[in-house]
Image (cartoon, rainbow, N blue to C red):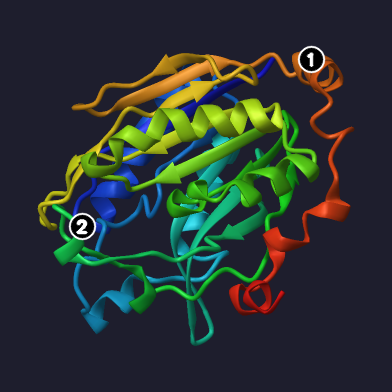
Amino acid sequence: MPKIAGVQLTGHVDKAVNVDKATRMVRQAAEQGARIVCLPELFSTMYFCVERRPEYFDWAEPIPGPTTDRMGALARETETVLICPIFERDGATYYNAAAVIGPDGRVIGKYRKSSIPFMDRARSREPRGDEKFYFTPGDLGFPTFDTPFARIGILICYDRHFPEAARVLGLGGAEIVFVPTNTTRMTRYLWDVELRAHAIANVYYVCGVNKVGVDAGGSSRDHHGDSLICDPRGEVFAQASSTGEGIVMADVDLSVIPELRALWGYYRDRRPDLYGPVAARPEARAAV
């Protein structure tokens, strides 16, 4: 029965401050028995997408690269699997990505955020999130990763609003889905209900990991925290504060998953022959 953890922290304009803080908190989680630890979206930077500043592209780095190398050493030291979401550069292309690092310190694989949002300031009460300026939509699909402790999947922030993505991870055998985010209080009402719904509909554990508060040296965006872990019945059994940094942690009993999947038959009784409209482009649907 592995113990999993999500590290909820406040961002900082200085990358070194973020990485140092994350390192301390991962060590703390590991000392308390955590075997898989997830950091929040873009953990090594503040949330910089509120304005178009080309110099922020200098913050991007490859995977493997300096930050994942340092976190790899930490994973090896703590004998944990680390999920490290960073601003990735791959040649001349930039992604909002997450590296999965094994207890041996090596990168097991990575996920790239698939759906890239644009939140217009005129339509919201928060500073806008102009991610389309910085990130190319992910090109890796929705992979799942075999780790020594569980088979896991990842959705990054906005991806969680798309039930199709959550289902693909279930079809890929995910037992735990980690959802690192930078989500603000404006969208707090969606948080629990969406993550619980994914857990119920796909019969896996979900660990949502958010930043909290206002990034030091950044915009006025106020991240609501509330990182949580819910079980395949949709019950939230661990949750962090809405105002302060901390670690959300729980033991997860993976043995309940096959039993519940057999009970409900959500995978057995699927009708993919009828689901074509879900994948069709809008223009194709209009022509039908």
Label 2 sits on a secondary structure element that is loop
Residue at 62% from the left image edge and 57% from the top image edge: 110
Q: Quadrant of the C terminus?
A: bottom right
Say whether residue 79 is visible. Answer: no
Judging by the rendered image, the residue that carries numbered circle 2 is 14
Q: Nearer the viewer, residue 144 or 87?
A: 144
Disc 1 marks which amino acid? Ser
Percent of width and height locating residue 160: 50, 46
**Quadrant position of residue 217:** bottom left
Badge number at residue 284? none
Residue 100 in sight: yes
Query: Could you say which is closer to the camera, residue 19 or residue 156?
Result: 156
Q: CA distance from mark 2 to mark 1?
A: 42 Å
Q: Position of residue 171 (x, y in %)?
A: 79, 43
- Which residue, given by chain and number where applicable, does mark 1 sit on? 255
Question: Who comes first in sequence, dot 2 or dot 1?
Answer: 2
